[in-house]
Image: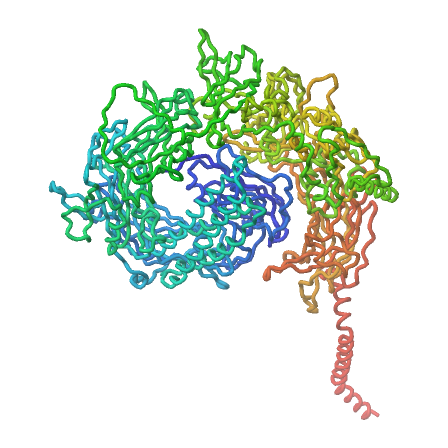
Amino acid sequence: MKERVDVYLVNVTILEGRHYVWPDMDSYVHIRIANSKNHTCIRKNTDCPFYNEYFVFEFKKDLQALIDQSITLTVIRPKTCWRRRKILGYCTLDLATIWNQPDHLFFQKWAILSSTSPECTGPRGYLKVTLCILTKGKQAKIPLANPTINEQIEGNLLLPEGITLERQKALFVFKVYKGDDILKYKSTMIDLLKKSRRTKELPCSLLEVTFAGITVSTTIQKYTSTPVWNEILTIAELFPPLCQRIKVVLKISNSSLRTVKYINLHSIANDQEDGFLPTFGPTYVNFYNTDKFGSVFVGRVLMALHTQLQHYGRLKSVIRKPLMPINENNLYKHEPVLLFGAILDVNVIDKRFSKKSIQFGISIGNPKISSQVNPAGEMYPINMTPPFKATKADDPYWYLEFGNRIPCISFQNNFPDLRKRFYNANLIDKMAIDFKSRLDAIEPFFEYERMHIPSDIIETKLIEALDRLAISCQKYIDMTQPTIDKFVTELDKEKLKLCLREMHDLEQLAKTIYNSRTKKKSFRKAQKLYRRLTLLIDHPQDCWPEIILHMVHNHKRICTQTIKSRSVTFSMIAEEAGCNCGKIQDMFLYTPLKLSNPQKSFIACKISIILWMGLKRHIDFCFHSLPKCFKFPSELSTIEHVPRYLINPEKHCRAHIYQGNFKFGTDTTGLSDLLARIIINRLSASTEVKKNALNPLWNETLNIVNVVIYGSREYLKSQPPSVLIEVIDHDTKFQNDLVGRSFIKSSVKFKDEPYTQPDFPPKLEWHQVLNHNSIVGGIVACVELLEVSSFVELKKSKHKREVSGIPEDIKPKLTSYKIDVMFWGVRHLRKLHGISITKPKVTLDCTVAVLESDILHKHEQNFAIHRKELVVELPQEDKYVPALVFKLFDNRSFGRFTYVGNHVVQMHRFLFYPLTREERDHKLAESQQKSYDSMDSKAPSLLEVVPKPSPVTTIVPEFKVENEVVGCCAFCKRISRRKQIADEEKKSSTSSISEFEKDIIEEDEFTDWWNKYFFSIEKPFNSSTATDIDRPISKSFRLKIYDDELEHQPEFNYLQDTLISFKLVRGEPTGDDEIDEKNIMGVFKGNIKVYPWSANRNLDYVSPSGAQLKNNYFDHFPLNESLSFLARVYCVRGIKLRPMDISGKSDPYIIAFMGNQQYNDVKNYIPKEVNPIFGRCFEFSGTFPFDTVVTIQVWDWDRNSNHDLIGETQIDLENRYYTKHRAHCGLPYEYTEIGYTPWRDIQTPSDILEHLCERWNIPQPQYFDTYIRISNLMFAPKLEEGEQPKAIYSKHELALNVLHRWNEIPVVGCHLVPEHVETRSLYNPQHPGLEQCWVDVFPVTDLPPPRPVDITPQTPRKYELRVIIWNTEDVVLEEDDFFTGEKKSDIYVKGWLTGMDEAQSTDVHYRSLDGEGNFNWRFVFRFSYLKTEHKIVVVKKQKVFDITPTERKIPCVLKLQVWDNDTFSPDDFLGSMALDLRRMPRCARSSKKCTLELLKPHAPQINLFKIKRIRGWWPFRGVDQKKNEHFLAGKLDAEFNLLTEEEAEANPAGLGRDEPNPLPKPKRPDTSFSWFKNPFKLLRFLICKHYKWRLIICLLLVFVALSIAYTIWRFPEMTIERVLNLIGK
């Protein structure tokens, strides 16, 4: 059958990115699921962007189709005018991985971004996401108490369970060899058996493999049922992969058929140290197709998988290449396999199939033609029975008459001999079944504490179960260890090794986990052993195809039943054989929906069949395993022939049916006229009809004679037959409706056995009644089969049959019980058939008696007489007590009572075993509790027991507590010692307020309720992970945050202790929440208590409050009179609201109403927000019982269309007000009358405590200086960590301490609701969401109500951050000087606040040769900061055409980067740091102490908002992309100064070195300049500095050379002149 199509929501939250390998980049995240796409907004100029965007993808499909899809998160750098779009990295995982997580949720996990380039294998960055899959009407279970717990990356990666961080490239190589028995899909049974001879009718097939979002397929093989591919399909992916399923699809093209097989990666790999890589086969994979008739075998494919890890080289994602053929004979041997079946009985046949012939067929794999001729000369295949015509039985069903010849069917085929897989699974399966049966026998001992089972019995049974498991594990090891080498594939060997290791561990644990002092804990550990054992049963590789049983009507296949081949496989070793091999199986065959009502499918027939499957050479064992009563036909010559018939060669059946319990009725009214019918073989019998009952008490014994049972004495004793019991809704005018069915194992007795204990008489037991695998109720019954000597002639009588009651030795023993009922009132009545219900009446049906309430008249909602009682006879044993049924009737004209609706509830939850007054006083006098002080703090325990002076008196002696020890009471000594400590501490300390709280108190004008709320979220008061700047918050900042509704908290009994709301339903549930909600006709409010009652001792018993039970249990409960009240509803915020606009946002606002009072808060709608902060309080005045429910709706505001409802929640005020847990006003953890959160209850703590003591009839409290005494219990205030005790506590402080520990008081104690905020689901079938709120309800008295709590959201405060960049040191040198070849950097620093578009930069320190830079440069950042949420608030339009701006809340993080300036190329990034101003790393005093250790998560931190100003050294962190490591990229000397807007205006400062308050210019070395801007300085400082002497020498040499040349050039002329002068003389 096809899976149900439902609505699924895939919720994706993109939070932030970290460590992108491209620094200072613009980025956005693209999300793709199937064909649905969406993306975040662009975040600019950061490698650590903060997105915080929420997306919802809606799919309407079945679950299997949904989890086949994959989700891809891609981080993209957007395109610009001069640069194309580029992908940074991506992450892909299938939705099946998310669905398999607890709660279908990945919460705040870091996804590793992988590169699209084959050369890059390291992470490209990290993306923090939350992924969740929700079904219709469900809510995500998101932890709300501490949203910042997932800051670390390494320990919180988005990886499925068992996947490690180290990932590398791998090749998943799929080898596809050939296919076999691949059929073109046919719809009829006859067509399946035909063998087509025409080529064009043969299928065209291909195989497709999908993994990690990549699909690769083989070539198409045309017109053949045995295709041969011999191809290798390769997929490249990181290992371990995030996707955990391999999808293998066999496509048959000419019939458009796609059959799917899933291979779970966990089942073919082991991630342990001694594990193995994914491997599979070579083995055959069987494919099946499912249609409206059932499963059909389509074919099988021989394939294999192995994984190759790649350490280097480029990998191609998809490869397909040829493969050498495989020789199967080298792998395994093919053997002829025989499947034999004997159909013993076919009954419960629906009358729709009574007119035509009926046949049954069986197959395993592809049915091949194998026929034989029957005596009539007709030929039928041996895997089908001859046609039979149905015969009418006594009941509405039909049956097949076989006579003395039982039809047999058989099937033969050749398969690989891989039985060892079946044998191994059967061994473990039988171990698990045996161990589970023993645990099931022990579990009721822990569930029913009132059974008073002796401890030694539990110990004996538990030790016996564990010892049996240890022996079975050792036996398994001895049997399977020698067979490892006999397995064929590598996966078979590795799985067996894994099983052996697990069995060894289970054996050791079974011997050691038992502890006699903690039996229940030992039992829970034993259950975990069972779960580990069951994980070893299934094998991922197929052995033989599954068995398919067909029912054929009029030569058309009607329905099928799939049977596991493993369960009927034969082995010569009994432990290895299937649990149903050669045994009778009873099963139902369901009809197709098109032949019946789609809402109520029916069963075609019930069949009893014996199946045996094994090798054909073991055929003799087949007949030996059959029941001994069968005889073979004489015409069989040898045993090797499979018989066509078995000749079968008397029992008396007695069914004892006591009572039933059903959840709903099948009539339109919601009730049923129930009868039980027992069916065994073709005989049946029925009980009487119980009219209008959901908890019928039949108390009948049904007798059926002449019952033929197949099997020998030993066989029937070991395998007693099952009897079918049907529960029918009897209709006199229409067809009877089936309520459900149940199989009951019978107790078999032979003539020569005595009818004595322990086997007889049988015991009545509860049996589940099922309807299409859904539990619809239960029935108490037992069945016995008694052997008789001869058949009894039955004569049909026309008179009414005699009713035979259950014998007294079988029927439960009865005793007197008293049922006290509080009929409080009815609420929310709907119209019945268009007529209003004006005079309702409620009745309580407890099977044996009915208790009625008064009739309410018009405009009345509470009953005048609301306490009634009834004494009845009920079974002594709790498990036999009947259910209780509340029924609502409307009293109409002429004395008619019209049935409206009902509610069925189990009586177990109301059972109460009362105490006598002496027992109650004794329990109050003794205390076995321990003080929580000794567990939660270092202070000594102050809860002690004082010896009781007298068992009668309640006077408590006073203790004079002074500086000296008075008396010998240890409690007084401890109190005196604490006073001395307090006096000493008082001298040296005047306050116990922590330093963190002082910072809050200093700014009173900015401290309100929101501080308390967000502190409680970030650091719960019981947190043990607080740092220096976030210590555990004290009482004044303590607030309990509940992750769901207050009504769902078990410590408060779900607020159902005083008033229980019973929903009165009319009609049958459909499974659709919307339709079922309309079937609720009203709500009855009341309570029930059921307890044993004896008239002889009725005056001794009292209720927990001390009231005598002779009157009524509810005498001390409040009266149901009208009560005026004032209710305040505080709406705090919305969480993960469904986006309703095209932009992916919503504009939420609140509508709250109660009765005729309504508040429409549309004017305060919050634009473009899915996590809005409402901060609204709505006040209502009402009167119980007329105003009981407050409805809060969240709507989406739209400018041009109707507003959309996001969701709504309803709060029952009445249950909160009357509960004993005081849910109408939570108790704060500190009593204060002033401040921003003063005491908000009408009563003071001491008044509340005195009222509780009076209500529960215990002595009034006695107050002392440092403790309080109630009865024999003493309570002192619980000290917080670092808190010093006071010398004297106020009366209210002491009382408030007792109220928070009220549950420690015996008998009457319970948890009281603290001051809290609850998270409520917004119910809308299509648009789920969450809202946080709380409610206060105050009665209208003479005292004025307290003032409401102001939860108006804080407005962000404007700040100015001034950052002075003084110097840098040890900055990495990235460039070589062109002229000198020296290492240098042109350093500048850039910084910005997250959310700010513009970054600020210093000037450039050119030519730094040693990493030193001097700047004296000031950055000025102006921002708005919300101190309660610790976020920067940025309000701007995201898009050009937006009408309203969007408010974004971003973490207050300052990003500082150091860069190397380049003139003609892009600047080089050197390093960066991200400083959260609220959690800044503590600076170093000098550059020598500045290391990367300062940036580690656990390094000391400071809060800049607290210290305002700081100067020091911080490290820049660089990333080596080749090694994927961090290194020290430089050190920064900076000064941070945080000012408010007012302070900044009073003391202005300019940017850089500008006025006002300018900074001095830095003293940079002369070598710091730009050669492009200052060429003369280049000549001066580069040439002159480095080549001065060379230049001088060169000049001298040039001068000398010129002199010589000049001399040489002038020498001839001078010589001639000289000669001429000489001659002239």
User: Does residue 543 appear left or right of residue 1130 in this picture?
Assistant: left
Position of residue 1046 measured from the top left corner of the image (x, y, whole percent): 61, 31
Quarter holding the C terminus?
bottom right
The percent coordinates of residue 12 (x first, y second) are: 54, 41
**Foreground residue among 245 and 128:** 245
Q: Is residue 671 left or right of residue 1184?
A: left
Say which quarter of the image contains residue 1209. top right
Please name whichever residue, 750 or 1420, is drawn nearer the observer in this view of the structure.
Answer: 750
Q: Is residue 1245 visible?
A: no
Q: Is residue 1102 above or below residue 618?
A: above
Position of residue 629 measured from the top left corner of the image (x, y, whole percent): 24, 44
The image quadrant where one finds the N terminus is top left
Residue 530 percent coordinates (x, y): 47, 48
In the figure, residue 376 lies in which quadrant?
top left
1170 versus 1598 height, above or below:
above
Q: Nearer the viewer, residue 847 or 1491?
A: 847
Q: Is residue 692 above or below residue 1501?
A: above
